[in-house]
Image (cartoon, helix red, strand yellow):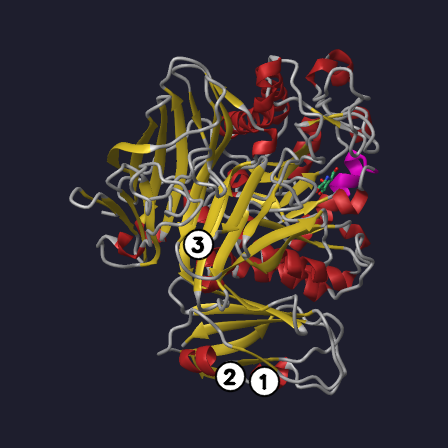
Amino acid sequence: MGIFYCEKDGTFTLQTKNTTYQMKADRQGTLLHTYYGQKTDRTDKSYWICCRDRGFSGNPYGMDRAYSLDTLPQEYSCFGTGDYRISALKVKNTDGSAASALRYVSHEITEGKYSLPGLPAAYGTKEEAQTLIVTLQDCATNLKVELYYGVLEEVDLFTRAVRITNDGEGNIVLQKAASMSIDWQSGAYDRLTFCGRHTMERNPERARITHGVQSVGSVRGTSSHQSNPFMMICDESTTEEQGDCYGFSFVYSGEFLMETEKDQTEQTRLVCGIHPDNFEWTLEPGESFVTPEVLMAYGKGFGAVSRIFHEAIREHICRGEWKHKRRPVLINNWEGTYFDFTGDRLVDIAQEAAALGVELFVMDDGWFGRRDDDNSGLGDWYPNEEKLGCTLQELGERITALGMGFGIWFEPEGISEDSDLYRAHPEWAVRIPGRKPCLSRNQLVLDFSRKDVQDYVIDRLKAVLSQAPISYVKWDFNRSICDKYSDALPKERQGEMAHRFVLGLYRVLEELIRAFPHILFEGCSGGGGRFDAGMLYYTPQIWCSDNTDAIERLKIQYGTSFGYPVSTMGSHVSAVPNHQTGRITPLSTRGCVAMAGNFGYELDVNRMTEAEKTKGREQIALFKKHYDLIQYGSYYRLCSPFAGTVTVWETVSPDGTEALVSAVYHHVQSNPAPVYVRLGGLREDRMYRLELIGVREECTLPVNDGEDIFGQGQILSGAALMHCGLMVPEALNGFQAWQIYLQAQ
Ligand code: DGJ
C-alpha cells in the first residue's frame, strides 16, 4: 500500500520504500503541496507552511489577509487568480479571460499504474503500483483537472500526469498545460541540467537556482540535442553520494519546458510540461486533453537518484521482447562506407565481422530510392536493387546465412524535395503556405500529425520489413522542425500541430512494434537528439551520439547516465583517426568505452589489421562474458570526465558479489599523483579478488601499472574497497583504459 488518504486533515500521503510525498486539500479546497523527500510518517506536514499578510500578494478570501495563492505551496499552479509565480495551467476561457482557480472535488485510489491513451508512460502491475487521481475543478468555468499520481513503491518512483476536461458550455483553449508543478517551501537549491549540441549531447551543467525564472526546453519539434527533458534539483552541497537530490524525467519526445523559480519568500517552484510556445489546444465541451507523464525520484546523492531512474526505465518504461533479451553485438556500416556501398561490399564487412563474434549487421542510410548522398531520396522506402546488386530479401538471406541478424536504417519522418514521395504529395511536407520552408540537411519533414501520412508510413515500412529477414531497425530523424503548420488542420488549431506530430510518431511506432515484436528498434536522431524516456517506451535503446570519439564519448555517456541506464545507450567502436575529431585512441580504450552501452562496431572490418582483429575478437568475447553485469548492474560514477585526468565508473551485480571497474585516462601527465576511488555497492563483509581484464596495449614506460597492483590477483575486503579505496593504475600511454574485474570469494 503506497497511497493513504486522511479524511480528518485532508492529506494524501504517497509512500515508497524510502520516500514520502504529501499534499493536502485545505479548508478552502486548494490542493497544497506539503512534502517530498526522505520517508517520514504520515502526519500532516502543513504545520510548516508560513501564512502571513504580505503586501501585493492578494487574498482570494478577502477577509483573510494571510491566505494568498501567491505564497502557498501548490500542487498544480494556475495562471491569473493571484499566484504570480510560474504556472502549470493557463487557459483562454469562453469569455476571453485567462484565469482559472482549482478546488478539490474528489479523489480515487486504484490498484496498478494508470496508462495514458496514445502516450508513453511507466507501467506497473497491481502488485507493483497504485494510482491516485485527485479531481479539481474551476467552479466559474467547469474546467475539470484530474491530477494523476502513480506510486511504484519498490522502485522509489512517483509519476505524474494530468487530464483536463472541458465540462463547460463553450470552447476553452489550453495555452499551457504542464504535467506537474511542485513547490519547495524551504532550502537553497541547485539545478543540474543536460544541455549540448549535435555530437556533444547531455553535458551536465550545475547552476544555483536564483530569484526569477530559469528554464531549459526545446521548440525544435523533438526533445533535442540542445537540452534534455531531464533535470535534477539538489541541495547546494549535494554530491554523487550524499545530499538531498530530486530527479524529474519527462516521458515525452517533443517540445518541452522545465522552469524553476525562486520566489519572494525563498520558495522554489518547478514546472514541467509541453513547451507552451508552440502549443494551443482547443477543448470543445466534453473534450479532454491528457498531458504526457513525468517520472520523479528522490534520494541521497546524484548516484542514488540515477540508479532509481536506471531501474525505472529498464523495468517500467522499456517494453517488449527486447526488454530483457540479450541485445546483439552489432556492426553498422555508416562510418565504414557512408553512402558508398554495394550489396557485395556489405556482405564482405558482415563476413569479417561475423568471424569476430559480431551478431548483427546493420545496413545504414543509402539502401533505398535514389540516395547516394543526403540530398535526395528520403521518403522513397523502396530498396535500390541496382545499387545493392540484389533484392533486399537476397541481401538479408546472405547476411543471415553468416549466422548474423540483419538490420536496416529508416528515417520515416524525413522527406527530400528530390523524392518520388514529395513529387506525389508535396502537401505531406511540413511547410507554411506562402513561405519558403527552411531546409536542414537539405531535407523537409513529413507531417506526422496527419493520419493519412501515418497510415502511409505504417504500410510502407510494414511492406519493407516483411520482404526480408530483418531483426533490427534503426529509426533516425535528422533535423529539427520549424515552419510548423499542417494542411490537415484548420487555422484555429495550428497550435496543436507540434503535439499531434509527436502523437502521430507514437502511433506509428506502436503499430510497428506490435506488428513486428521480434524486431529490435533502436532510436536515433542524428545520434542522441531524441534521447528521452518517451522514445525508450518504443525503442529500448537509442544511438547515444554521432560522436564516436572514445574520449568525447566519456562525457556524453557520463551525462546520459544521470537519467538513463547503460542498457539504453547505443555505443560503438569506430576507426582511428576518429571521423569527428581526428583523435587516435587505442582499440582497447575504444572497446572499454563502447562496452558501457549497447556494444557494437562502426567501421570497415576489412581495413583492420590481423592484430586488431584478434583484439576485437577478445573484446567481443569479454563483453559477452560480462553482459549481465554491464547491462543490469548498479552503476556508480566514480570520477568525472570533466575534471582530473581519469574517468572511472563501476557496475556492481545486484547481489554485490561481482563488479567491473572501468577507467579511461582523458589526460596523461608525467610524474602523476596517484588517483584513488572509493567503490560503491560492494558487500562490506566479503573479500574480493581483483583481476585486470580486457585487451591491453604494449607499453615500455616505467610506471606503477596494473600488473604491479593486481598482477598477483590481489584480494581486498569490500569494506576496504568502499571506505579506504582503490588506486587506479597509471596510464601507460595516451588515453589508456583499464578494466578491473572484482569477484567475491
Ligand atoms: C545520423 C545517424 O546518427 C548516423 O548514425 C547515420 O545513421 C546517419 N544519420 C545517416 O544519415
Q: CA distance from mark 1 to mark 2?
A: 8 Å
Quadrant location, ligand no. 1: top right
Query: Distance of mark 3 from mark 2, alpha carbons?
Result: 52 Å
Seen in the picture, residue 157 relative to 245 is either above or below; the reply is above
Q: For the residue carrying disc 2, how many other residues have a C-alpha within 10 Å: few (<14), some (14-19), or many (20+)?
A: few
Residues packed near mark 1 inside 10 Å, few (<14), some (14 to 19) or many (20 plus):
some
Query: Residue 267 got which mark?
Result: 3
Of residue 84 and residue 271, the one placed in the foreground of this image is 84
| Residue 434 in sight from this viewpoint | yes
- Disc 2 is placed on an element classified as loop
| Left or right placement of residue 62 versus residue 436 in this view | left
Q: Position of residue 373 (x, y in %)?
A: 83, 33
Give yes or no for contact between labels 1 and 2 (Cβ–Cβ under 8 Å): yes
Residue segment shown in magenta:
340-348
Q: Amino acid at mark 1?
A: Ile
Q: Which residue is mark 1?
A: 709
- In the picture as drawn, the residue positioned furthest to the left comes out as 8
Task: Give the residue number, with chain letter if any, for mark 2.
Answer: 714
